[in-house]
């Protein structure tokens, strides 16, 4: 008997203007998400309008390094 197992993965994020305990979550299927897709999902989740009007800077919370 073969079973198809599906996993949901997630990225926790917050804006610099938010307190550390105010994080939000983006969930997605599969073990990875492209940076472009992650930005698009964050913009949609927060109703920020068009992606062309600004860009999000993604930073690793542990190292404080920007992710390109």
Image (cartoon, helix red, strand yellow):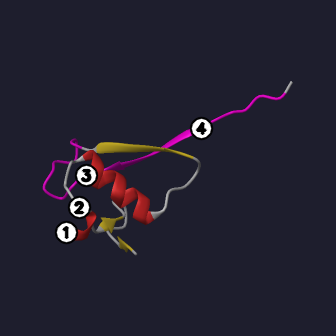
The residue carrying mark 2 is: 50
Dot 3 or dot 2: first in sequence order is: 3
- Of labels 3 and 1, the one closer to you: 1
Q: Are marks 4 and 2 in contact (CB under 8 Å)?
A: no
For the point 25% across and 69% down, the residue is 52
Dot 1 or dot 4: first in sequence order is: 4
The residue carrying mark 4 is: 7
- CA gap, disc 1 and disc 4: 33 Å
Q: Which SS class for mark 4?
A: loop
Q: Is residue 42 left or right of residue 67?
A: left
Q: Quadrant of residue 35?
A: bottom left
The residue carrying mark 1 is: 53
For the point 50% across and 56% down, the residue is 33
- CA gap, disc 2 and disc 1: 6 Å
Point out residue 22 in the picture as x, y percentages from the top left corner. 21, 42
- Of labels 4 and 3, the one closer to you: 4
> In the orientation shown, which residue stands out farthest toward the bottom?
68
The residue carrying mark 3 is: 14
């Amino acid at each position: 008997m073969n079973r198809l197992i599906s996993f949901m993965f997630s990225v926790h994020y917050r804006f610099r203007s938010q307190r550390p305990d105010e994080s939000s979550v983006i969930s997605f299927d599969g073990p990875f998400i492209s940076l472009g897709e992650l930005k698009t999902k964050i913009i949609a989740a927060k109703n920020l309008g068009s992606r062309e009007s600004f860009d999000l800077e993604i930073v690793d919370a542990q190292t404080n390094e920007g992710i390109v």
